[in-house]
Each structure stands twice: as C-alpha cells, then as structure tokens.
Image (cartoon, rainbow, N blue to C red):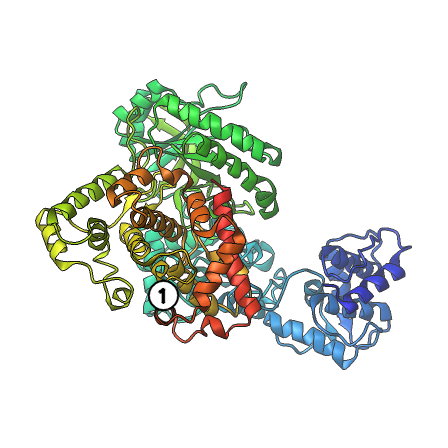
Amino acid sequence: MADEMVLKAQKWVNATYKNVAGYNACPENGKTGWPTMFSLTRALQHELGITALSDSFGPSTIGKIDARGGIKLDEKNKNLIKIVQAACFCKGYHAGDINGNFTLNTQGAVAKLMEDAGLNPALKGAVQAKVMKALLTMDAYVLQAGGTKKVRSIQQWLNGRYYGRSNFYLIPAEGHFSRDVQKALMKAIQYELGVPDEQATGNFGPSTKNGLKKHNIGQGDSGIWVQLFSAACVFNEPVGSYETTFKSTWDDKLTQFVQAFQRFSYLPQSKRGDFATWAQLLVSTGDPDRKGTGCDTSRRITAARAKDLYAAGYRIIGRYLAEPPGYNTEKPMTKKELADIFSAKLKVFPIWQYGARDLEDFRYSYGYQHGLRAHDTAEGLGFGAGTVIYFAVDYDATTEQIASNIVPYFNGVVAALNSRGKKYLHGVYGSRNVCAQVSKHTYARWSFVSGMSWGFSGNLGFPNPDNWSLNQIQEFSFNGPNGGSFPLDKDIWRPDTDPGVASVDKSANPAGAFVAYVSKLYDLAKAYGKGDPNRLVMQFCRSKKYNGTLWQTLLNPADAGFIAYAKGKGMEVLEEFNDPSTGYTLDPQHIMAAAEGQAKVGGPEFAYYGEIMGWAGDLYTLYAEWRRDSDNYSSGYKYCQDKLARPGVRSSFGYADLIEDTDGYLLGQDCKTKKKNIAQAVEAHYGDGGRFLKRFSHFFNDRFGGTAGKAKAAAHSMLTSSDGLVTTMRTGIIENQVKGVPTPSMLPSGKLDEYCQGFADALVERVGLE
C-alpha cells in the first residue's frame, strides 16, 4: 500500500538531484525499498561534497558526517535536514514534514528510532553518523512478524552497549537472528576479550578461540560472559522443547538448555559453557579439531583405506553416486568399493552431486533428471529401500536463490523419486539455510550440513537445522599406515538420525514389522471373541497414550479384557515405526486413535467429532499456539505457512502429525465402510506399492472433495461448531495446550478465515508434492 509521505520523499529526492552526476532515481510509488534508500544515500553524499556517489554508506560518508559533528539541529543546509526527514518517513517514523526545518516532530522521529534500536534517545544537538546510516537502511527497529521479544532485547542490548566502539554499527532490532546479529555478537565477544576495535572483525579466529578457552563458565556464574553466552543460546533455540532467556546469572534453566544443546550437537554433556559449546553456538564448524566418527571423500576407498579409517575411529563414510564426464574418475563409488567398505565394518551414505556449484545448475527439470539418475544408480549398486540420498548444493546460495532455484530443483528430485515408487528418500547437503529451507519446503528427511564453510552467508546467522544428521567440519589429508594419503572431510555424525547403509542387495519395507504387528493383533482380537476386532486392535494400540478421561469423552475406554488377553500372548503397545515414503518416525498410537475416531463416529458432514482424534484436534492445538504467539504472528495464514507440517519446526501440528492424521483417517474409513478389516487396511496402506505413495491425495480427495474451499470450510466448521460435544472437546484441547487464549468464536471472522485458509493451503502443498 502506497504511503503519501514516502511518495513525497521520492518525488522530492528525484526532482532535487535528477541532474547530479552519479544520482540514480528511485521509483515514485509510495513504497519504501532499497532503491529509495540508495537514492537518499547518493543525495546525502552529494550534499556532503562527495563526488563519486555510491549506494554504499561507507567510511567516506561516515567520515564526512563525523567531521561536521553530525547533522546538527541548527544545520544551515536545508537539504541535509530534508534527507533526514525523508529517511524518517521511509523508515516509518513521522517527522512532521519534509521542509528542511529540524522541528520537534523531526527530533522526536529520530529519537524514537534511537530508542527502538536500544540507544539513549537524546540527540545532543545532532544526528550522528551511525544513526544516519541506520536511517538509510531497510533494517527494522520494531518487532517484526516471526521475530521474538527476547531476540530483540539482545539486539537492543548489543546496540546500547557497543554503539560507542569505532567499528560497531547499529544492527536491526526486529527480533530475528541474522548474519548481522551473529557478527555483532562475535564483535562483542572480541571487545570483551580486549581485542582492539580495528582488529575486532567478527571472525572466529585464533585469538578469539584462545580467549574463549579461558572463559569456561557454568551454574552460579554471573556477569558479562554469562550475558554473551546466554545470548548465543537464545540465538540457537529452540532445541527440542528447551528454551532459555537472556540473563546475567547462570540458573537451572540455562543449565537444562545447555545440556539439551550439547546433546543435540553431539557434544560431551558437561552442562557448562566450555570451549566446545561456545564454538558450536558461534560458528557452523563448532570446534573443527574435535573427533568425528563420520567422513566423506571424492576418492576411491580401497580395502586398505577402509581398514585405516575404521582404525582411526570413523564409522560412516559418504561417497558419490556419479560425476559429470571429465571429472575425477575416482568420485563415483563401485560395487567392489562398497564390499571393501562393508568388510571393514564401515557404513555408507550416498551423495548425489552433478555440478551443483552455481545457480545455473539448479532448476526443476535438472532436479527431475538427477532424481531419476540417482535412483537408478543407487538401485544398480544395490541400495535398499529407505536409503537417504543427499543431493548437494555446493555453493553459498542466498535466501532468494533458494526460493527461486534450489527449492524447485528439489521439487524435481521429489517428483522423480515419486515416479520410481518412492524407494529412496531425499536428503540435502548444503549450508544451514539451504538445509533448513529445502527441508521445510520439500520435506527432505535428513540434512548433511556443509559446516566447514563457516563463512557462507547461509551458515552465519542460522542455527543448525533440527534434522541435521551430519555436519562437515574439517578438510584435511588423511594418512593411513596401509592405504596412504588421500583428501578427507571430517564429519560429525548423529547415529540416532540417519543410520547409514551397512549392506546392499537387501531390501525390506521399513513398515513391514508394523504390518505384521497389526495382523497378529487382529488375529488375537478375532480369537478373543468379544467386540469388533477392528476397534479392539485400535484400542490396544492407543491404550497407553489415548485412554484418559478427555479421550474417553469421544471414544469408549479401551477394552481392558482384550488388553490383558493380548499382553498375555506377548503383545505390547508399539511406540513407533518408520514410514516407507518419508523415513519419518510415526506414532502408531496417534494413528490408531485417529482411526478409531473415524471408524466410530466419522460421517459425511462437517463438525463430526470423531475427527477431533485426528486432524481437527491438531488444528485446535495449533490454534492455541497461534493465539499464544499472536504478538509475533498477527496472521493465522502465515502461522500455518511457517508452523503447520513443517519439518524442523517445533509445533503441535508437525509433519509427522499430519501424516498420522492422514493415515488414521484412511485406515478408519476403510474399516467404517467395511472395505477392509484393519489388518487388510494397514497392509494396503503400508505394504510394498501401498497407498502411502499418494496418501495426502487420497485424504484430500476423500475427505475434502479435492478442493481447498471445502478443506477451509471443514476447518472453519470444526473451529466454530456449537455442537455440545465438539465444543467441550475443543475447549478442553485448546485449554490443555495453552491456558487463557480466546476461543475461535471470539476472533474477527476474517482472522479465523485466514487461519483456515492456511490449513487448506498446507494440504494443497502436500498433495502437489506427490
């Protein structure tokens, strides 16, 4: 939406400087953007007497302003004041008018920006150079959507404490962790270590490393080092369910977070701010000298080399499926090589890289071609179903490039693997940002992080993705007693994620054990001789987690007699199994609770309460979280886009939840319509070539008629229905999730419509990726 005063600023600066050599006109559209800020910057430089105009507000511009003592309140050059006023309007601060008079409104606008940034708002007679620089950026100094108040408080603290240092410039104060914020924190550490301003570069160099080794801190400590350490912790949260806050005294909550972070980062759980933890919080390599059990190389691994690697403590190695013609002929792995690797008790993770070093290497059609070739090559080598293939992005892709090229490339990969029957799962290799965004938008199972490239823009200012399985931290020449010297990258491997491949030419359905489990339970339910065998199976499976008072409001209590009977036959409640098409760990208790809700009370009309055991219940809990976070997320649509079924995002309606809701619905429908019994339904769904290949399409078409409009309407109905049982369950679930949030009926209809549209579009996206 156009702003009248921004438009006035654009018209003024263009009219005033159009004939100045080196001036570039900005659009006159009333919308703030970098082109307008660049035009104002060039206008400022001209007024300061700089002849070589530039978009950059660099040292020359700063020096000129400093030499004047700032842009003073009694400045005689009216155009300088007009530039200040125009910049204020473009930043969203009302400066009164663009008239060249430093009025109280103009002073108040500049003072408010300073206060928002974390500075003392007293102008002291002039707008200082660093404040003017901040005015002419697109950085925000008020909380932005998706940002957090505690990150913003750290940003303001950094600005306030270090503003006086010669090479420290104002960073945004909008609540988002970013590259600039990370660099500012690193500079702050260097200042506190006593590094001279001109040497405080924000790089994690030897002097910074040596200094941090002297600041091993822990519970009970207080002061500036706890502040800096806790700030770094906040920038890396959440870690699972653990969060912390910015603080000056180390307390129990910080200890709990540190232990969780060390566990997540695969560090020794010292519960202290030791050097390894400092390093992992600050840079993508962490401590590159620490021991790793994973590695990768472009060189052929002979039997001798494999033996040397195992003796050196390595347990898994990444090798390539292919390489374009004319490259290193040792790069692609062979069957003989795999046999040598497995004989040495090493595991393998396959990598696909075909170029992948430039933006031009990434587009949908290339991804599709590469997905087909990767599948066929892996199959030819004998890799079994469920193997994760890591597709590489081997350059520093920006956020914009990830959206324009990288994600479409991976969509092509997904489509190709789907066309071959989803035998293999796609993973991603790249910077933290690449891994996080590709996982979020294409549901990559695991991330292989190129942490060794710590200077990548995609590694600075981004925490490790939640689904990281390997982190590449050091490149060196490995020299073994048997196999000689060859180049090797050291990786930190989390064996509780991607287990790697220990053998080939053997293929098994990852869900096979679950299929057999349900079949055995069904046979026992029939032999039990009392009640519906389908629902007895469902009740046994959900009895541990979904048998409390709240759930019994919708479903009968699980049959205690059958539970005792089945347990007497050696059966126990199954906690998890691996999904064949996504590799995600699924909860059969949730699936069977959703299935029983559908089988018992599902029907063709909206607001039927059986679905509260499935997708509708998760929609309620996510609603509660949205209202809890409404200060940061006014839009329910954006909240769904960011939180609903997104891998690596903490949410009560995660990706696995949507899979479980979908599968529960389909299994329940099979039993309700008597198309299949539960054992047959599970076999048809999860067996080889099963319905899981297009589960979201089946769900979307069967439940919502294949239209986003009907999905939105169904969501709205489940959130607003006045049916007594639905109301009771909805209130109870929302209140259990977050206490005190307003009920959906209390929201303006437009806001609730946005939330429901977000749900519908999330489903459409998933269907589209099948």
Q: Secondary structure at mark 1?
A: helix
**Residue positioned 82% across, 72% down in the render:** 98
Residue 482 makes an appearance in the image? no
- Of residues 219 and 626, which is closer to you in this image? 626
Give how far across and how far down residue 666 sits, in percent: 35, 47
Residue placed farthest to the right in the image?
19
Q: Is residue 145 left or right of residue 91?
A: left
Quadrant in which the N terminus appears: bottom right
Residue 91 makes an appearance in the image? yes
**Residue positioned 80% across, 74% down in the render:** 97
Give how far across and how far down residue 235 sits, in percent: 47, 59
What is the count of numbered marks? 1
The residue labelled by disc 1 is 254
Q: Is residue 85 left or right of residue 236?
A: right
Give how far across and how far down residue 116 sits, in percent: 61, 72
Looking at the image, is 186 positioned above or below residue 249? above
Looking at the image, is 440 positioned above or below residue 731? above
Amino acid at pointer 1 = Leu
- Of residues 310 and 17, which is closer to you in this image? 17
Q: Is residue 182 left or right of residue 612?
A: right
Decide: few, some or many residues near mark 1? Use Cα within 10 Å; few <14, some 14-19, many ≥20.
many
